[in-house]
Image: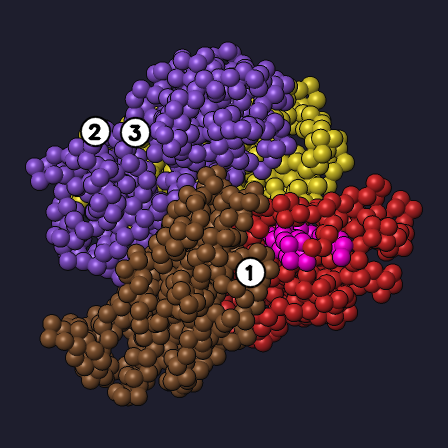
Chain colours: A brown, B red, C purple, D yellow
């Protein structure tokens, strides 16, 4: 057996741990050849190809190293390869490259978009693929959780701890913008873990006046500072209480300077308080994965070998109720996981006094 | 409603977060009086009683603070109160104290032993109790996971990261003894997360010669250092391969200087390598809880209020498949959770080359 | 003896440790009364006054707590008190308040501005003061180093570690903006400690083309990613190589969106690379002080007591060649410490390949 | 120029950062060949020799990696090479190897012992050497500070933070044994930084009854827990108050189970309190160096190149008053730096209430 392995989309803590587990298991226990493909599918499409034979030795130290040694990219969809003259379909070339390199299949580690590409490559070009899901936002419905998520949560929680003391010392309202374009899991979990007073999620269009009232109430209670966590996709509700339509969200965020800026401005209209904004940004992606993510990534890497060994091409690794198994890729990419309105976590947050910007 | 709250047994990161969540929710949303009882049940049994009215203000800063502001103790079973003349039953006095203080019930946060006491207090003395489980070892079958566990795992994983570089620089075999008297969850999870080469668990009596062979094999492969994680209850198998009987374990550990010492000596008999031992001990208990544990502890504290509010005395909070609910205390304390022989985590560990000291 | 203590200006990790050390030493060893004044001088100027008697007990847990329990503010200069009708001089009222509260003097912990106010209060109003310097930027010439600086450096270094892996995975140029409006010590020290490739300082107006050439050279050497640390006061040189005049700097930074934005745009004009910006901002101020700062802050707090006990009013605590002593306030506030062109640290940076944006 | 570089003695955080800085600077700026010698001098004495050509690429990622990629050993003195028949002098062979490998000199990174060997090699065998000091204990008089020290201090301070909460929750006396066989700098600095109540140093033979009195006093003051830091070379004074003679110390520590055990037993004789011991051991050596040590190690590596380039063989790098320079090796190895009785740090500790076990 000769298997290619690649990482696509944004990087996440734990990618290297998946690679390491896959390589060690596949080579030592099964004796396969494992070929690393550089920068997502690009390594197979560029000339000369950028491939490297992986060995257990090449994976030393990878368990706790952030990023991906194989490189990755957000560009390079083989079905819509960007050229000056517009996108072209290079999936046929990719299939030829896979054949020429005598790869029996590809293990593709990536997000939603990458999984969809992988599935099309299998369906339309006959390339056997096994998927390993990666999304820091944790918004894939097919798996209970993904690696990288907890590392991002820990980073955001640590940031809240830091902002807490400075907010308290200066009687300020501190806004912290964290990842979560479509789903607010990071903001929700980090907000509760970090003792935020307000959490604003993409799933709950918020009323700035309610948030301002929370700030004012805290002042009246002798707590003249407030911590507000804002997911990068959170927006105020329209005057009639409805959400900004999906199509307009991107533009609104761009025009408004990002969700944190928008929230700070909107809330400041209703309450007179010194406000500051902190945008965590790329700090959430980088760095060594926390133990939770190292474990999960290792389990995913091992499970990918098991799927390949069982000939279960076309499946994606996932974890459900603490058991790692496979799920058909077709199914895996079909739905996202949002924070439901009846989430027990939201109820927990409300119970400890967190404001979500909208009446229940 | 007037409710007492106390913490019993060894401390664990997250106890304060439970207290904080309970107090905030109970007082702000329900208007209850919440009375903190100091040092487990002692605060109700000593004269004068050591009780304190809890307020949201008294809980400021508790979310990320280790230990327990209420104090705790491993001594002080009301049914077997230690006196110079032998243990006496003071559970009746406790019931009187609860009545005199006009407490409608007690919220008891503690381990296995404390839960059993709580249950007896309800059955035999009619004191309404709600339990919140606490075990760093994560060995309670009634709940998928307990707070404090992940903090201990992170501490042990960090220790492995540290030992890794020094072991590698000096070509040493480093033994790390971690918590886990009866169940090896911490050793197992931290071992995989921290890249251990050998993991020794209470559930798997190990063959020192096998461990030594792993050390030697690594030397032959040009990796002349080895990291061994030893749970504090792990022991070598008897010559016939059987486990040391439970009754003898405690004595064996005491005579042998602890599981780490025993393992180091036993393995060193079979292989010539510079070996060093590190015992993590109390470092695993202390310090600020990691985000995972802050969240879980907050959820448990909130759920305890929900149980009391619903009149579900006699139940214990637990989490199952990421939903926090209640389970009858009778049931909750009846069984422990060990690492099963067919654990997917053990299979994962083996897949990445970890030796568990016994043939599969 | 009855002494007031207050903190002014922006908060810094270690303020609480100074307070704790002062209070413990002054009360236990000397039996003084120590009165905490809230929110810089405001606690003495507002009606009712906001003062609190400090006790060793009120300082428990302060050693490792960020921020300041006394509160602080960047507003509230008694000599130029802000009113709707313009600034007024309330220093006389302050002197009266000090007299009425029977304070023998004030211990003032703060930055450059606060020290100047303290000095004027002593000279013009006869209020005995002892100063304790606080500047995260470490730009006070009178002391070798200040507490808070190393905590900010550690925060920035950790951020570089995080950005490193993501930059490497994506072949990106990552810009990290750190504190340092006038002096670039944080950028310089964190940049070397965190393995930055380029460091841009306020003291060295940079040539964007040189920075771009460094990026390009790394690409040619097979390292297609670059880490750039930008102090918040760093600006490109004017076309003739000269610095932007001090008077224009603030406006330039405001118009340009901050030093990081300006640098990213300027460099991107000369090289085609995917660039991203991260602004650390308030994360550098908050959180628990690192051990270095806890020690220094404790030494400063103790030294402040020694100065008061010796009647050395009008002096400021400082450390020089690892010995903590006092220096006249007049002298202390007269000059700032910049990164000198012949700094050994800059030479060290150059030796390991760091680009500073200007030819030597 | 062709220079060998090696690391000797126990490992310390920052060794790799020295190597990286030396290699990058020597190769890129001077074009030298740099040859890594494995496992101290062993790489030159074993057959076949274990040498590796270093390149900037081989140093990627080394800045923040603990341990030493060159390997190290506490054995292997070329002047007293251990053999079954007793030690033999192989320094002549070493000189031959250096000549055969055409090395113009050796850069030797190591502790006291290694520096003395280096100096003898230069004097007696004519091998040009430049030394770089390494001692976690920070006990070399020739340099103000060494890399690795602050990383150990941070590790010990973090341990104290952890033990604090558990000690407080359980009303315990927690003993923490930290590094420092001859000099107590780590215990002193970490003790103050971590809020210890008692610090026991090798330089101050302690009276256990005094320590017990401190414990009792805290109980009386309503603080029924105590943190005691014990340097691994700290011993009780003899009944007459005198120190245990140097010759007997090693045996006393061995017989007594280590300094922590001895202290715990001795103190427990005078006060009835639940006591626990934690031995930090190898955790202090390992792991990523903190920013302070990365900077210092980088400066030392660069300075070593400067010394070689200037032909200043026979010197050792050192830092004094924040300037890195060279000092003759002869001088450098002649004296150790102990904690002086009139140390300002000890006075600071006493001021904040720390007990050192002996009357002033």
Outermost front residue: C85
- Residue drawn at 72 percent across, 67 percent down: B310
Q: Which is more toward the observer, A60 or C270?
A: C270
x then y, percent, for residue B187: 57, 61
Find the magenta span and give its range: B1-30
* Mark drawn on residue C200: none
Circle 2 sits on which residue? C342
Front label number (2 vs 3)? 2
Q: Are marks 2 and 3 on the same chain?
A: no
- Disc 2 is placed on an element classified as loop
| A268 vs D358: above or below | below
Q: Is residue C93 left or right of residue B282?
A: left
Q: Which is more toward the observer, B28 or B46?
A: B28
x then y, percent, for residue B147: 61, 59
* Mark drawn on residue A349: 1
- Residue drawn at 48 percent across, 60 percent down: A357
Does the residue at mark 1 contact the one at mark 3 (Cβ under 8 Å)?
Answer: no
């Amino acid at each position: 057996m000769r298997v290619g392995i690649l990482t696509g989309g944004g990087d996440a803590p734990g990618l290297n741990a998946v690679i390491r587990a896959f390589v060690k298991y596949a080579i030592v226990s099964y004796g396969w050849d494992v070929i690393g493909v550089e920068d997502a599918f690009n390594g197979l499409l560029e000339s000369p190809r950028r491939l490297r034979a992986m060995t257990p030795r090449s994976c030393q130290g990878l368990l706790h190293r952030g990023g991906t040694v194989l490189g990755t990219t957000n560009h390079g969809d083989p079905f819509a390869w960007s050229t000056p003259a517009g996108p072209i379909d290079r999936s046929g070339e990719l299939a030829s490259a896979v054949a020429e390199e005598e790869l029996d299949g590809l293990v593709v580690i990536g997000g939603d978009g990458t999984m969809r590409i992988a599935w099309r490559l299998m369906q339309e070009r006959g390339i056997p693929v096994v998927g390993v899901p990666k999304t820091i936002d944790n918004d894939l419905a097919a798996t209970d959780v993904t690696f990288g998520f907890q590392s991002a949560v820990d980073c955001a929680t640590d940031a809240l701890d830091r902002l807490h003391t400075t907010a308290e010392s200066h009687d300020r309202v501190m806004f912290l913008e964290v990842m979560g374009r479509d789903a607010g899991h990071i903001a929700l979990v980090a907000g509760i873990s970090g003792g935020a007073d307000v959490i604003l999620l993409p799933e709950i269009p918020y009323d700035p006046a309610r948030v301002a009232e929370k700030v004012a109430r805290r002042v009246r209670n002798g707590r003249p500072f407030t911590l507000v966590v804002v997911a990068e996709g959170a927006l105020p509700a329209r005057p009639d209480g409805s959400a900004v339509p999906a199509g307009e969200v991107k533009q609104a965020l761009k025009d408004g300077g990002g969700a944190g800026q928008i929230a700070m401005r909107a809330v400041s209209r209703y309450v007179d308080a010194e406000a500051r904004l902190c945008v965590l940004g790329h700090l959430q992606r980088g760095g060594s994965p926390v133990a939770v993510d190292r474990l999960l990534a290792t389990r995913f890497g091992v499970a990918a070998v098991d799927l390949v060994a069982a000939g279960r091409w076309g499946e994606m690794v996932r974890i459900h109720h603490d058991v790692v198994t496979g799920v058909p890729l077709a199914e895996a990419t079909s739905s996202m996981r949002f924070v439901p309105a009846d989430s027990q976590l939201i109820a927990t947050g409300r119970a400890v006094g967190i404001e979500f910007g909208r009446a229940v």
